[in-house]
Amino acid sequence: MRRPWFKNEPVEETFLDSAPVRLSETFAITRPAADVWDELTQDGTLWWCRILDEVRWTSPRPFAVGTTRTVRSLKGANVINEHYFRWEEGRRKSFYVIDSSAPLFKRFAEDYLVEPTGNGSCRFTWTIAYESRPSMKLGRPLNDRLLRTLFTDTRKHYA
């Protein structure tokens, strides 16, 4: 049986500040910024996040604007195809969801910003921005709780 797919609307970087829902966490990490960036762009990245089953790059390296990725989450209940609209190698990357197998969001984007703060330390800011589909607005508290586990798991990973 074929899985249904639900198109999301593309976004620009302004959406990361203007979205109806915006979740963001900043992590002080005692590792060099280059090491954290490498981990965030490696194959199987975000393996420490419990709601993510698989993160797979679907574009060849080197990555740049236009890179794509597929994420399986929630024990395969949702599959998400992502498109990177910003890529500043070693510093920042942002994507929006092209489509997904669950009809949760009208628009969805994430931004990863890694900034050095010293010789062996950095600051990682992860922002999630979305607009729910009208039929899914009542599910916002659950969506937010699930998405915040990404931050909780990342804080534990880099502790």
Image (cartoon, grey):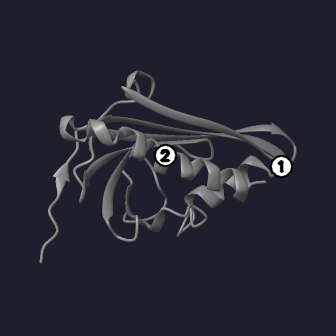
What secondary structure is marked by label 1? Answer: loop
Relative to 39, say whether 20 is above or below. above
Identified at 32% across, 42% down, the residue is: 139
In terms of depth relative to the viewer, which is nearer, 125 or 83? 125
What secondary structure is marked by label 2? Answer: helix
Q: How would you rate the neighbour count of disc 2 (Cα within 10 Å): few for under 14, some for 14-19, many for 20 or more? A: few
Report whether 46 appears left or right of 37.
Answer: left
Relative to 60, say whether 17 is above or below. above
Residue at the far right: name it.
119
Report whether 16 appears left or right of 41.
Answer: left
* Cα–Cα gap, marks 1 and 2: 27 Å
In terms of depth relative to the viewer, which is nearer, 25 or 97? 25
Q: Could you say where residue 101 lies in the image, as x and y percent from the top left?
A: 23, 60
Amino acid at pointer 1:
Thr
- Per the image, the residue denoted by label 2 is 145
Can residue 86 be seen here?
no
Q: Could you say where residue 112 lies in the image, as x and y percent from the top left?
A: 55, 42
Q: Could you say where residue 149 lies in the image, as x and y percent from the top left?
A: 55, 52
Amino acid at pointer 2:
Arg
Can residue 122 be seen here?
yes
Relative to 1, say whether 106 is above or below. above
- Per the image, the residue denoted by label 1 is 30
Q: Quadrant of the C terminus?
A: bottom right
